[in-house]
Image (spheres, rainbow, N blue to C red):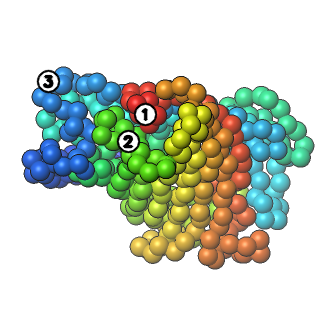
Amino acid sequence: MTAKISIMRTALAWAALIIFTGGAWCDDQSAQDQTSPGQNATDRNSDGTSPLFFPRNSLRGFADSAVAPPHNEIDTGLCTLAKGNPFPNTTCSAFARYVWEGYLELQPMGRTSLRRLFLIVEPRIFGGNNIPQYRYTAAASPILWELTIGAGLELPHHLELRYKYHKAWLLGRYSGTGNAASLRTDGPYGRYATVGVLWNFGGWGRSNISAHGNSAHGLVALRGYVDFEVAPPHDEIDLGLCTPAPEPSLTNATCAAYARYVWGGYLELQPKGRKTLRRTSFFVEPKVYGGNNMPQRHYTGEASLILCEVDAGIGLELSAHFELRFTHHDVNLLARYRGPGGSATLLSDGPYGNNSTVGVRWYFGGWGHATR
């Protein structure tokens, strides 16, 4: 209970900081931003006639539904310790066949300085019932639910200040404390909070709501974002490399793979030319984690490299709001965690392992492809 109260106090403190300090600074910049090509989509679309509450496209984002083909299941990290696991669990089938996820932004205000404030919800649900090399099924048994919530504040020049809180819940037969079906009591990344800055470019996301947002000069159109996040002390990101909670005898006292920093981004390239070619896009989404922390032992500001995740793939625009996507996810351990013989970690792969999925994405509220 004490830990939950501490986290809530931290969340409220950061939310207050985002609203008041960032909002005041944006107001000071509003005059010069009204004619600047780098001004925000919110400012461009706010002409004084917008409703005070819930303006046009106040609810925006996308929803995904993806399937992992056989032998490409998503490893949620709940079953096996890849490095000489002395506690194999042959009854654990938490390798996901399906992923349902989305990204939702809600902009409550259409006028005043609070129009730059938006709320964030990112749900992700995994389902399946598979044991690699033993059993492959099409079942959609619930496994894991991840949820990221937060708040953001639009700043000038396509910048955003963001606070996010992440938590995971085990579902179905994996839920509940002391459950022998899983070697972990939490899901990938554990429970953490971050504060960060995001810069979007080329008409990605919210900036695409405006007709001025999409950059289509030259032979290709480039759009995406770059972000940097910091997890405050006691809110580090658990990459699942160190300690499976139900087996304390496996605890590795030298493992400090709890991340303080996250460097991420998304780049989408859309060729120009024939109509069919214009509907094709190539994307890459890298994410690098860094830190050197052991919960309840030591907390540092070091940025030692831990893990690199990369999603890469191709998309085909089916209509103004739907897109067919193929995505491959790859994970690589870095620095002292790298290599099959490394003793700094109990796992040889990171969250979700290596997998491939095919899925359909739906854009709404003027987000992404919806206004190309």
| Cα gap from disc 3 to disc 1, whole angstroms | 25 Å
Distance from the alpha carbon under mark 1 to that under mark 2: 7 Å
Image point (53%, 63%), residue name: 288
Under circle 3, the secondary element is loop
* Tag 1–tag 2 contact (CB < 8 Å): yes
Q: How many marks?
A: 3
Name the residue at 40% across, 40% down: 205
Q: Amino acid at mark 1?
A: Arg
Q: Nearer the viewer, residue 315 or 99?
A: 315
Q: Secondary structure at mark 2?
A: loop
Observer able to see residue 130: yes
Q: Quadrant of the C terminus?
A: top left
Q: Nearer the viewer, mark 3 or mark 1?
A: 1
Q: Do the CB atoms of the residues marked 3 and 2 lie less than 8 Å apart? A: no
What mark, if any, has residue 214 been given in the picture? 2
Few, some or many residues within 10 Å of mark 1 (<14, 14–19, 20+): some
Q: Is residue 196 left or right of residue 304?
A: left
In x, y percent, where is residue 1?
Answer: 43, 46
Residue 45: x %, y % from top left? 23, 33
Q: Which of label 3 and label 2 is nearer to you?
A: 2
Element marked by disc 1: loop
* Residue that mark 1 sits on: 372
Residue toward you, 89 or 238 = 238
Residue sitting nearer the eye, 109 or 254: 109
The label on residue 49 is: 3
Give residue 213's quadrant in the image: top left
Compared to 101, does 17 lie above or below?
below
Q: Residue at the location (46% across, 47% down)?
A: 221
